[in-house]
Image (spheres, rainbow, N blue to C red):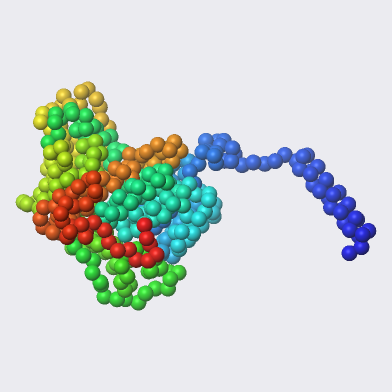
Amino acid sequence: MSKNVTQHSRRQFLQTTASVAGAAVAAPMVIPSSALGLNGTVPPSERVVVGGIGIGRRGGYDLGCFLQQDDVQFVAIADIKQKRRGEIKKIADDHHGNDNCQMYRDFRELLDRSDIDAVLIATGPNWHATAAMTAAKAGKDMYCEKPVTKNISQSLILADTMRRTGRVFQAGTQRRNLPHFAFACELARTGKLGKLQKVYAHPAGMQAMMSGWLVPETEPDKEVVDWDMYLGPAAWRPFNQKLLDGFNFEKGGGFVGAFNGGGVLEWGSHCVDLCQWAVDDCLPPVEYNAPKDGELMARYENGTQLIFREKGWIPLGSCPVRFEGETGWVEAGDSGKMVLSSPELLAGRSVEEIGGYPATFHVRDFLDCVKTRRQPKGNAQAACNAHIACHAANIALTLNRQVNFDNATNTFINDEQANRLRSEALREPWRL
């Protein structure tokens, strides 16, 4: 190219640039009101950008609770099922009035996005701990459905990971943010019932089951259903639609071992969690006995008993708990109601009755903590202690004998058989 042509081209470029700049100064810049936080919208600087990992039946409910919050922007879904990815994208896009929700088959691609602040993890229990710890290492906060771990070892690693990374972790134990359960736990925790003697949990079944291998079926294309990713850290087994759909054996106890953490854990991660709150979130019990007459008794270091009981008491709905002290007792359940040994325990207070165990308040607690960096009600350490209690009870149930747990070493005392059940081998590459 000649020198004259080069100079002429440069002059043309500068003239064109000046004209465009002048037009930009003359014309007003149009900025959407949503970007400024006008008309009741939340400005981008105050929004929590959220992605979802494994949003199925329960996760769909959780997502609805997130989308009710004005400061949530849901931007991505990772799921092993193509159909589900499309369904969640439509829900998010319809809610936000755009086409921005991105879809991923591999959740690690979602976690690579720097614009995402937090994730909703609502996979099956097999994935909860692994996905949560991977998210923490990627710098994301997380709301994780329960049960959050499959064994004692995972529980300890989860709590340690959240401490080291400084991430906000909220287990899906939403009853911690319901007024009547909170008040019942407060009465027990603060001595209003006298010296606490017994806390009762209703795990809705005490069974030790194994998932085994079901009859092999034709495995779908990976884009339709990524079976290998579905198995994740669990031992490999051939595809079967019932396994994929979360088929539960017999009375809904779930898959012990490969896909879940045991019969006590499914509801126990709620009601035992409340019992742990009632004893001020102390370390788990140290003694666990085999079931007798429908009850499995565990004992804390201070002598207080944690009793897993198959049958409820006063009909107060699902997930009932009962706390007994030397001078009084209280019971609460999912009906939103409490029953007290004496009306004087209310001390003139009015406790709101919210039935049906909604998660909206729990989600709000999580989002507020994402912004303030304080610990939410269902934090990782609280979840760790409650889950260890459930896992240890499952071990006593499986072995059908007493086991004794040392909280200093997180091992069973002089019990090689029980200690082998503290953890499981994980399939490559899903190391914790």
Query: In which quadrant of the rendered image does the C terminus lie?
Result: bottom left
Q: Residue at x 26, y 58 (%)?
A: 423
Q: Is residue 283 above or below residue 112?
A: above
Can you give x and y, in whole percent of width and height, for residue 287 in the image? 14, 47
Q: Residue at x 37, y 60 (%)?
A: 431
With 402 as the anchor, is 252 left or right in this view? right
Locate residue 422: give its quadrant: bottom left
Q: Is residue 105 above or below residue 49?
A: below
Can you give x and y, in whole percent of width and height, for residue 203 in the image? 18, 50
Query: In which quadrant of the rendered image does the N terminus lie?
Result: bottom right
Can you give x and y, in whole percent of width and height, for residue 263 in the image? 20, 56
Q: Nearer the viewer, residue 9 or 134?
A: 134
Q: Residue at x 44, y 59 (%)?
A: 107
Q: Is residue 363 above or below residue 419?
A: above
With 55 as the anchor, is 339 left or right in this view? left
As drawn, which residue projects farthest toward the top?
348
Q: Residue at x 7, y 52 (%)?
A: 292
Q: Is residue 239 above or below residue 17?
A: below
Can you give x and y, in whole percent of width and height, for residue 248 in the image? 24, 62
Q: Nearer the viewer, residue 264 or 312?
A: 264
Q: Nearer the viewer, residue 290 or 177?
A: 290
